[in-house]
Image (tube, helix red, strand yellow):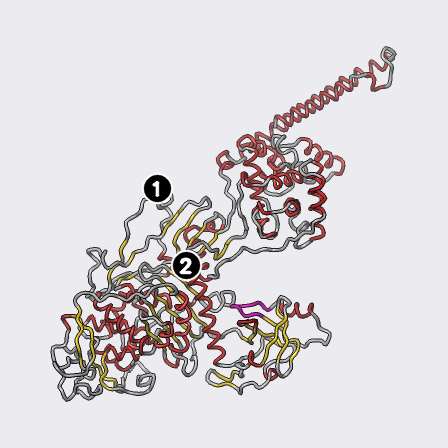
Amino acid sequence: MLFILFGSIQSIGRFILKFRNPCIFNFEPGHIPAKYMTLSSRLMRFSLASLLALTVAALVAVAAAYFYIAPQLPPIERLKDVQLQVPLRVYARSGELIAEFGEQHREPVRYRDLPQPVIDAILATEDDRFFEHPGVDYQGLARAVFMLVTTGEKRQGGSTITMQVARNFFLSREKTYLRKLTEIFLALKIERHLSKQEILELYLNKIYFGHRAYGIGAAARVYYGADIDELTLPQIAMIAGLPKAPSANNPISNPRRALQRRNYVLGRMFALGFIDLDAYQAALNTPDDASLHKAAIELEAPWVAEMVRSHMREHYGADAYTAGYSVYTTLDAGRQRAANAALRKALLDYDRRHGYRGVVKHVELAEDAGPEQFASLLKPVRPYGGLLPALVTAVSGEEASLVLRDGREARLDLEGVAWARRFISVNRRGPKPETVTDVLKRGDLVYVQVLDEGRWRLAQLPAVSGALVSVDPHDGALQALVGGFDFYLSKFNRAVQAQRQPGSSFKPFIYSAALNKGYTVASLFNDAPVVFDDPSLETTWRPENYSGKFYGPTRMREALTRSRNLVSIRLLQAIGPRYAARYVQRFGFRPDQVPRDLSLALGSGTATPLEMARAYSVWANGGFYTEPYFIEEIRDADGETLFRADPAVACDDCETEDAGEEDTDTVATDAGSPPPASVADAADSDAGNGDEAVAPARYARRVVDAPNVYLINSMLRDVVRRGTGRRAMALGRKDLAGKTGTTNDQRDAWFCGFNTRLVTTVWVGYDRVRPLGNGETGSRAALPMWVDYMGQALKGVPESLMPQPPGMVTVRIDPATGLRMPPGQAGGLFEIFRTEYVPTRYSQPEAAGDKPGESGDSGAEPLF
């Protein structure tokens, strides 16, 4: 304020001195008439009085304005603690960018990291006296006042970089005298408390450059896909010219005008001596190569990104999108990529098995239609899940010519459409196409899939859905998650939101409950028809095996391996549905998910794929409950750690005193909370305070005793070796275990499998529940997805078998009766028992080795 007044007084004084010079009236000294001397004196006194009055009035007005505005100026602390709006960024555990959330794309840059040409270009075009004036350039203000006096219009002018910082950070953009005065006073205050370098840094990180790019670092990334220190001189000049009019001077939306503005900036740099003639001319002759560069997403995991966004919004409010948080998830990048590919392949394979539902749409193409019309037709059709939209431009009997969205051309031969038999129903298809024209015609909009060696195949967006969840069983760290075919086709996260019937994949929990009651893997149950008359049901319930056959008395191991429904029902009847419903809650299932009737034996409850993965982790880690989590670390904009995950870890040798074997019917945990709740609310922890003290590990609670877990693990490895999961043997490993699941009419297909290091659950089904079709069991529809994923996820991971715990013995038994083989008699097989439950009776010699059912033993009670 004082600077402006002092400058004004100096100007007035110079005018007065000039006015007092008699030469201004063109009289020779000593020859001025007296009347003119008198008039001159009077005029000078009047002028001096007027100027003095105006000066005093101006001083009073400015002082009054200052005293009115000063209390409204932000305090010094706020000036020194300016927060830039930096988006929320989500990363994989190893640092690959997954997503960015926030309206403003910003990459803050420190002043010390700014190349000198960037500083020169900005000063040349915005404020070349920046390092000379005290925040307000009175020469620029004088020009603005002159424009006001001569034109009567209020135009923006005279704004220094400091004044722009004041306006952009603290003021509105309205053009009023009061706002301009406030801007001036605030600029002077900023200059008193911040250095020139700090002010320029704030300006370059705050100013808008168009296309959601805030700050010069973001502008370099958005327009040229480069860091600020990688830009060339012409690129720097182009970016420096954007703040004046980010839309009008934009190289994307108005390249001609943007080039003119760039060249103006280069001219200013040359005129001010920032660049020499050679550099100036070379830059002028360089064509611009700006194009839009979106945030370089390095890992496709949009469902996990949305889970993170929801968690951050819940715990940090609206600041989550602007405070510059970096969230590092537990995702393994390689496993996530494998999960994406495996799920999409499985759904596309299923879709091809059931026929072609038709083209996206058909348009009549003019004979002279060309690239422009093709592009306009393809533009609204976006790619999904690796499938590319294409337009059929010509068809012959043997091949079709297509144009892709990016202008490329493709060819579809008969092999590429051979699968496309017309869809009639989920169980019926039309005849196999004999020519390409049986499927396609000119003007069809379709989806295609690129295959190996540049070949193409006709495709369609799957109507069926699926999910894959993979976790580390030792601490619950999420390794991979896919919630559907493509996030932008459907944002519904089936991995954590789809409550579906698990079918036979639920049976291991019922069998564990039976083992906990004293039954053994050799206990016999009759696989025979059964009818239930329940008054609450409209019809009599007649459950049966998937094959429709009955196999008589069957050992528990064989029943689980072959997924025998009737044995599971009789087993549940023996132990009691209410007991089983309470028992399974220790695996994390909520009471409302578990029916308390015999249908529970066939998986009639509900669970999400993530909940099934959590439950199966108990079999993989030796009997401990671990809660899945997906956020490893949260950092603020300065890189300081705000939160670091501290999961409970499964550890056989580290059990706490209250983590003993759980033989009661009570619920072992309060599990079942939604995934975001598993990320502890620990933002106020002292992590990141510079002291890297290692907190003591937290140990997971044991919920199933070790022998029980080992027996279930052993039976589930049999499922893979010789049962419904034997397709998994294609991986050539001996440490894999799991269980298929198929619900009534094949409405849901599951496979839940694991080894001691990784648990993965996959599910396939329609969002609106309906049959998948004949033969679409868990083994056929879901298991191939699991095999494709685990084949990649376990590459380089050595085999790891669960060690046999103490208190177990191996005994030779008669497979027909489940009893011990008599000494000296050949045959039989070896089975594992808990020491206290080893069979004491011997099989009769005439029954030994007979087929199940010929021994006469009912198996209704455990055979001790």
- Front residue of this view, candidates 693 and 602: 693
- Amino acid of disc 2: Leu
- Spot occupied by residue 71 in the image (x, y as percentages of width and height): 53, 33
- Amino acid of disc 1: Asp
Residue carrying label 1: 691
Query: Would residue 20 appear left or right of 407 to someone viewing this image?
Result: right
* Quadrant occupied by the C terminus: bottom left
Q: Which mark is residue 843?
A: none
Query: Would residue 232 appear left or right of 29 to someone viewing this image?
Result: left
Q: Is residue 424 above or below residue 165?
A: below
Is residue 58 visible in the rendered image? The answer is yes
Which residues lie in the magenta part? 381-388
* Residue at 50% from the left image edge and 36% from the top image edge: 80
- Spot occupied by residue 709 in the image (x, y as percentages of width and height): 24, 68
Is residue 541 visible in the rendered image? The answer is no
Residue located farthest toward the top when viewing the structure as drawn: 30
**Residues at marks 1 and 2, CA–CA distance in whole angstroms:** 27 Å
Classed neighbour count for the residue bearing mark 2: other residues with Cα under 10 Å, few (<14), some (14–19), many (≥20): many
Query: Would residue 859 appear left or right of 135 to someone viewing this image?
Result: left
Residue carrying label 2: 331
* Quadrant occupied by the N terminus: top right
Dominant secondary structure, magenta? loop
Q: Is residue 26 above or below residue 769?
A: above
